[in-house]
Amino acid sequence: MDAEVREKIHLEILKRTGAYHANDHILLPSGQHTSEFIEKTLVTTEASFTEGLGAVIAKHFAQWPIDVVLSTGPGALILSHCVARAHPSRPTLMYGTKGVSAGKRKVTLPAEFHRLIRPATKVLIVEDLVSSGTTVKLLSDLVEELGGQVIGIGALWRRTKKSEVAGKEIFSLVSRDFPTYPPDQCPMCKKGVALNQEFVKRREHRRPSSARERN
Ligand SMILES: [Zn+2]
């Protein structure tokens, strides 16, 4: 099966979770418009799908021995469990916690995990969505500070054009970014397609800040 067909299958699977929307005219929290959208929190809601997709990532990395699977964030952790379960090395699963320090995003590894990453420990980083790659870079820095070695990066979805972070290739099941437009340059607006404000409304309902989360 070629990569393009495989990617289409994975995209269909994600569509069935309700996470992926296409052929729409969507208002984003940033004020930009787009025709496609992925709702991060819905990506891992179907356990059997997540297991299947996790197994595909594990299979890609099966040729390398892995000691630790590392992730951060609830969705990524669910996926990383599935990857760790399916990898032949039977790696340990651990996670970092996200936070902000002095206005900068950071990821911290709980102290109990520190002794599990030693010099030459082989680590696979797993993410659900990779957008800017910042989270992956922070995880990679953590591993290197402890002397570990990042073997690779596995993800469900890569939204960035960058195919590698911290010198490591990102293996993603779907590699797709979608263009966003300011309203005055939006082709859907020009065609008079009704604007879907559902996602912005839902966010405003949930919390006052409409700050955009980027991974
Ligand atoms: Zn528009």
Image: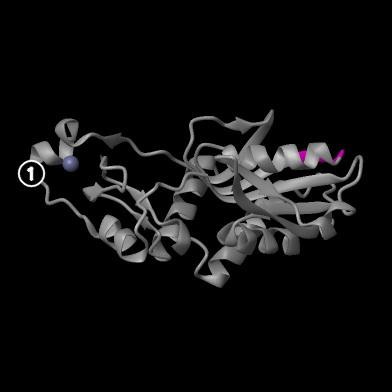
Residue 21 lies in quadrant: bottom left
State the count of labels: 1
Residue, x 16% and y 51% (percent of image)? 195
34 or 57: nearer the viewer: 34
Give the left or right position of residue 5, taking residue 21 as reference: right
Say if 186 sits above or below 57 in the image: above
- Considering depth in this image, is 215 or 159 the residue closer to the camera? 215
Which residue is depicted at the point 62% across and 66% down? 51
User: Residue 128: percent from the left, percent from the top?
Assistant: 56, 53
Query: What percent of the width, then of the height, locates residue 94?
Result: 75, 58
On the question of residue 180 being in view, the answer is yes
Mark 1, other Cα within 10 Å: few <14 / some 14–19 / many ≥20:
few
Q: Is mark 1 within 8 Å of ligand 1?
A: no
Q: Residue furthest left?
A: 192
What residue is disc 1 on? 192
Residue at the spot 18% in from the left edge and 37% down from the top edge: 183
Q: Is residue 91 visible from the viewing direction of this image? A: no
Which segment is the magenta one? 147-151
- The one nearer the camera, 120 or 110, is 110
Magenta part, dominant SS: strand
Task: Indicate left or right for 206 with 125 as reference.
Answer: left
Q: Which residue is at a point 46% across and 61% down the rendered structure image?
A: 41
Q: Is residue 46 magenta?
A: no
Q: Identity of the amino acid at label 1?
A: Gly
Which type of secondary structure does the marked residue at label 1 adopt?
loop
**Horizontal relation, residue 97 to residue 145: left or right:** left
Q: Position of residue 125 (x, y in %)?
A: 70, 47
The residue lying furthest to the bottom in this view is 47
The picture places residue 201, in percent across and down from the top left corner, at: 26, 60
Q: Which quarter is ligand 1 in?
A: top left
Residue 148 among those drawn in magenta? yes
Query: Vertically, is 107 above or below 42?
Result: above
